């Protein structure tokens, strides 16, 4: 696999992870609201804030999943020489691969609060 394809796969995996995280967090919040039995303006503010957060996270996860090829192309432009160059991941390359995935994770992690 080329570095570009690895980056694209990592971005899509992080997008799926963000989607699952958004759904899980929203369901937890709605469950806690229903169990507490409180009503009023204060609770409504939290529900609206949770809904906005949920939709922003859904938007970001969709952007990561669908926009991964364009982002990978931006950081790894296609070259003729790169088409022949392939990365072989073996037992000695685990550290390098882990650092690569961690870098992609931090890229997405810093983009989420922005």
Image (cartoon, rainbow, N blue to C red):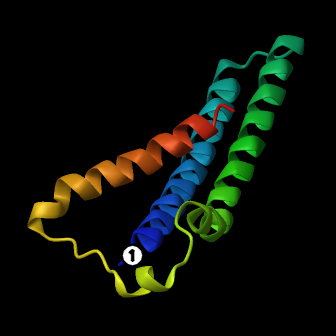
**The N terminus, quarter of image:** bottom left
Q: In this view, does 43 lie above or below 76?
A: above
Q: Which of 94 and 12 is in front in this view?
A: 94
Q: Element under label 1?
A: loop
Q: In this view, does 60 lie above or below 66?
A: above
Task: Find the residue positioned furthest to the front.
Answer: 81
Q: Is residue 109 above or below residue 73?
A: above
Task: Find the residue positioned furthest to the right.
Answer: 41
Q: Which of 77 and 56 is in front in this view?
A: 77
Tag 1 residue: 2
Q: Which residue is drawn at 60% across and 69% down?
A: 73
Q: Horizontal placement of 108 versus 62: left or right?
A: left
Q: Horizontal placement of 13 versus 50: left or right?
A: left
Q: Where is residue 37 in the image (x, y as percent from the top left)?
A: 72, 19
Q: Residue at x 80, y 17 (%)?
A: 43
Residue density around tag 1, few if under 14, some if 14–19, many if 20 or more, within 10 Å: some
Q: Horizontal placement of 18 versus 92: left or right?
A: right
- The quarter holding residue 53 reads top right
Q: Position of residue 14 (x, y in %)?
A: 50, 54
Q: Which of 33 and 1 is in front in this view?
A: 1
Q: Where is residue 58 in the image (x, y as percent from the top left)?
A: 70, 50
């Amino acid at each position: 696999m080329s570095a570009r394809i690895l980056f694209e796969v990592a971005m899509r995996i992080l997008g799926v992870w963000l989607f699952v995280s958004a759904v899980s967090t929203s369901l937890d919040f709605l469950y806690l609201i229903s169990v507490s039995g409180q009503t009023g303006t204060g609770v409504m503010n939290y529900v609206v804030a949770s809904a906005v957060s949920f939709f922003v996270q859904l938007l970001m996860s969709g952007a990561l999943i669908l926009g991964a090829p364009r982002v990978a192309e931006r950081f790894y432009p296609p070259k003729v020489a790169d088409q022949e160059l392939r990365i072989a991941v073996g037992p000695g390359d685990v550290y390098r691969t882990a650092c690569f995935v961690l870098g992609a994770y931090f890229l997405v992690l810093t983009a989420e609060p922005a």
